[in-house]
Amino acid sequence: MQVQHQLGADIMFAFDECTTLHNTRKYQEKSLERTRLWAKRCLVEHGRLTEARSHRPYQALFGVLQGAQYEDLRRKAASDLAALDEDDVCFDGFGLGGALDKANLGTIVSWMTSELPVNKPRHLLGIGEPDDLFVGVENGADTFDCVAPSRQARTSAVFTLDGRVNISNAKYRRQFSPIVDNCDCYTCVHYSAAYLHHLFASKEMLASTLATIHNERFIVRLVDQMREHINAGTFYDFKNEFLPRFYFKRLEKNA
Ligand SMILES: [Zn+2]
């Protein structure tokens, strides 16, 4: 808490133990209690530091929910941390964390979100694949963070509406249009796919930077569009239009 207050982080996360799906049920129970006690200590210290640094902008503190694949533990984590109140210091939002297998992501997120207050943000930790973002949003997650878009960009994998493509492939050598037509990112506004292909072939550092800018923008635009479609009442229309096109190649391979 002290380090995060010194850094001036806008959103801080309470200390938690991130378990795996392979830990025993008994271990998960013990670990969950440890995380709850740490959450209490974090709130107390956060309250003290907020008061001591009251001339600084407020820093929000989120509690992190664990519980692996167990419904009762996930629900308990959510209701326990939502109820914590240390001298009127409560969590400002919640991080949905820990071991989440892709197949059960939506179910596990919905167990937690159904126990959480509706007026506080829910942040789904470490999720960034387009299909997982739809599942997260559908089940009540508000915000996300993930290394995947930048990590993939560094290996020349860039996002398009027709899925992830490898810009190092020969077919992009002479594509003098942007990676994605009408993409408003810095990379697409200024450079062609062919130029990015050339940078990766020449092992230029700039290749990773430009590809990362494009992938990050692609993901941010995707969640912006989800929000617009939620407001317009057309979220599922958007989902049914976006996902089949984005994963078409994968569907084709499995057919
Ligand atoms: Zn772009």
Image (cartoon, helix red, strand yellow):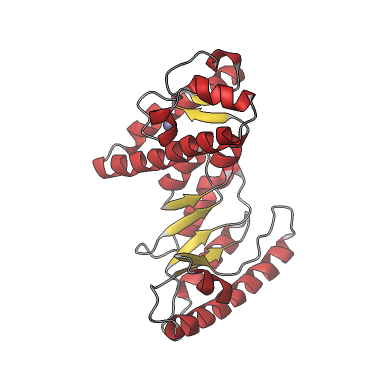
Quadrant containing the C terminus is top right
Q: Is residue 188 left or right of residue 157?
A: left
Q: Nearer the viewer, residue 134 or 13?
A: 13
Q: Where is residue 183 in the image (x, y as percent from the top left)?
A: 38, 30
Q: Is residue 125 left or right of residue 60?
A: right
Total numbered labels: 0
Q: Is residue 95 above or below residue 56?
A: above
Q: Which residue is drawn at 42% across and 19% down?
A: 177
Q: Is residue 240 above or below residue 137?
A: above
Q: Nearer the viewer, residue 61 or 115?
A: 61
Q: Is residue 126 above or below residue 204?
A: below
Answer with the quarter of the image where residue 184 lies.
top left
Q: Residue at x 43, y 64 (%)?
A: 116
Q: Which of 111 and 234 is in front in this view?
A: 234
**In what quadrant does ligand 1 lie?**
top left
Q: In this view, does 94 lie above or below 171?
A: below
Q: Is residue 145 left or right of residue 222?
A: right
Q: Position of residue 156 (x, y in %)?
A: 59, 29
Q: Residue at x 49, y 82 (%)?
A: 49
Q: Is residue 14 visible?
A: yes
Q: Residue at x 53, y 63 (%)?
A: 75
